[in-house]
Amino acid sequence: MGSDSDLPVVTKAAGVLKELGIPYEAHVYSAHRTPAEARAWSLAARDEGFGVIIAFAGMAAHLAGAIAANTTLPVIGVPCKGAALEGMDALLSTVMMPSGIPVATVAIDGGKNAALLAAEILAVSDPELAEMLDERRSAEAEAVREKDAGIESRL
C-alpha cells in the first residue's frame, strides 16, 4: 500500500485471501517517498515466490505502475478514495498505463475484487483453488436466489 491510510481497503483484500488460504504480505511502499524500496521489493518478488501483486494507492496512485515497471508478475492496482476527487484521480493514475506496462485495475476501494482477481490468476495453475472459487461463486448465487425469494414473498 502507498500509505497506511489505505489499510481499510487492504483489510478487505486480506480477509478474502485468508478465507481462500492464500499467503500474502503487506507493506507500505510509496512510489514517490520510498521509490528505491518499492523497486527493490518489486524486483525480488518473483524470486521470493510471489505469483501476483496487489498495489493499493490513493491520490496520484503511481504505486501499481511503479511496481509493474519492475516486474513481469501480474499487478493489480486498487485505486483508493481520497478526499479531493473521491478517488477519480487514483483511478485514472492506476488505469492509464503506457503500452507495454500493464496493470489490471479494479474499482475504487475494490480490495475484495482485487483479492478475488488475484485468486483467479493463481487458480489457473491450482485446481484446488479453482474449486474453492467455484464453490464461493455458487454460494453467492444461492444467497441472491434466497434474497429474491424473500422479496417475492413480501411483495
Image (cartoon, rainbow, N blue to C red):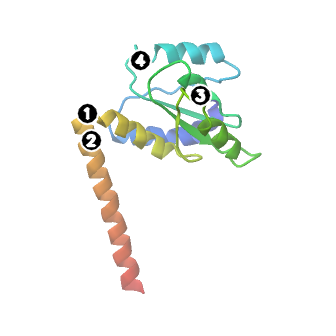
Three-letter code for the amino acid on which mark 4 is drawn: Arg
| Callout 1 touching callout 2 (CB < 8 Å) | yes
Residue 30 pos. (x, y %):
65, 24
Q: Which residue corresponds to mark 3? A: 65
Is there a contact, CB below 8 Å, between mark 2 and mark 4?
A: no
Q: Which residue is mark 1?
A: 126
Mark identifier at residue 93:
none
| Crowd band around label 3 with a 10 angstrom C-alpha radius: few (<14), some (14–19), many (20+) | many
Residue type marked 1: Asp
Distance from the alpha carbon under mark 3 to that under mark 1: 27 Å
Q: Which residue is mark 2?
A: 130
Q: Residue at x 47, y 13 (%)?
A: 44
* Side of 72 relative to 82 (left or right): left
| Alpha-carbon span between mark 2 and mark 4 | 22 Å
Q: Picture coordinates of residue 13 (x, y %)? A: 47, 40
Q: Quadrant of the N terminus?
A: top right
